[in-house]
Image (cartoon, rainbow, N blue to C red):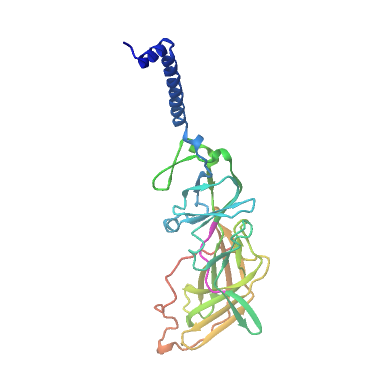
Amino acid sequence: FPTRRSSDLAKRLLTNDIRAELPFTCIHLWILLCLLLFLAGCERRELTYYDAAEITLTADWSQSGMDNKDEAARGATAIFYPTNGGEPKIFLMGDYSREAIRLPEGVYNVILFNRSFTDFSNIAFRGNDGYETLEAYNKKIETRTDGETDTRTITGSPEKLASATMEGFTVTEDMLGNYSQTTSGKSAYSVESGDDRCTLHLVPEKRTSEVIAVIRVEGLNNVRSAICRLDGISESIFLATGKASGQSVAQEFPLSHPVFDEGSPFNGTLTGTFNVFGIDFTQSHRLHLEAQLVDGKTVFEGDYDNVRVTEKDNGEGVITIYVEATTDKIPDVKPEGGSNSGFDVDVDGWGDEVDTDIPIE
């Protein structure tokens, strides 16, 4: 005979209670499964917040005169100054012609220069926090007393410097996240990397000029070594504008490469080569010569106002400045050691002979 429990079960089957409950539970499970699959299939970009865009920064150094392996090995520095006054973003470029960098959304003024802030021997920087105030200056300056006058003198020629700028470079919201992550921490471009907005190309220009000073000396055979000081030299340069500062100093430089006039064993020229941030061409220049003579004890000094300063462009934006002057007659002295020659070609300090073309008008 059927029990009461079996009777209740039969009643539920007859009333379709179980069949009603079973489909209801499966529907809910099916909806939940579809929802999970839908969420798993969503693009990662929709679920991830990106706060930076990847920018390809390229530089063409051919206009700077520094498109060579030595400078390339030293890299470059790119500084992005937010126009809203935020903290500048500084990137060191191991490859000075191409680098991938990441920037948050914003508008930037950009400065690019060769090497880094600390990779120069004679150049230092100040005003680094501002686009318009970033200034490269010569850090080897001494104050010399000449009679009653104190003269600030550069004792080390600045290295070659080049820079490029761009104002208003914009990183927009839709540029964010245009990269894919890799385990090395570098970046690999996604399909969006072809966007021209994500590239920045700069062409640096030379910010220092080479000076070739040719000094005509009567009595060159009596000179063992010589140095000069030339006034009217710019102390620094602003990288944003490429304009030299109005602060003027003197530049000290050695003379070498003695070349005697054809047929003369006494007279000729000495040459000095150095770099400057700029020279004031609106003023007359004064040259001070200090020469150690071949007797080993006499020092000849002279100051000259008959200094001719000109500049020549090679047609590719590289400017060479020529300084020409003529000294007084160097006194005759007996060479140290009793040598019959007034000039010893083996004396240290003269350097290797260099052929220099001097423009003649």
Q: In which quarter of the image is residue 147?
A: bottom right
Q: Which residue appears at 51% of the width and 88% of the height?
A: 298
> Toward the viewer: 129 or 30?
30
Mark yes or no: residue 231 visible.
no
Q: Which residue appears at 50% of the width and 36% of the height?
A: 47
Q: Quadrant of the C terminus?
A: bottom right
Q: Position of residue 264 (x, y in %)?
A: 48, 76
> Toward the viewer: 235 or 292?
235
Q: Which residue appears at 53% of the width and 66% of the height?
A: 123
Q: Residue furthest left?
A: 1
How many callouts does the rendering have?
0
Q: In which quarter of the image is residue 23?
A: top left
Q: Where is residue 173 in the image (x, y as percent from the top left)?
A: 58, 40
Q: Which residue appears at 43% of the width and 24% of the height?
A: 29
Range of magenta residues: 154-162
Query: Does residue 117 lie above or below 104 as drawn?
Result: below
Query: Does residue 54 lie above or below 313 as drawn?
Result: above
Q: Quadrant of the N terminus?
A: top left
Q: Position of residue 307 (x, y in %)?
A: 62, 72
Q: Quadrant of residue 150?
A: bottom right
Most frequent secondary structure within the magenta stretch: loop
Query: Does residue 190 lie above or below 142 as drawn?
Result: above
Residue 296: say if magenta. no
Mark yes or no: residue 212 visible.
yes
Q: Position of residue 221 (x, y in %)?
A: 47, 81
> Toward the viewer: 50 or 7?
7
> Toward the viewer: 32 or 186?
32
Residue 159: say if magenta. yes
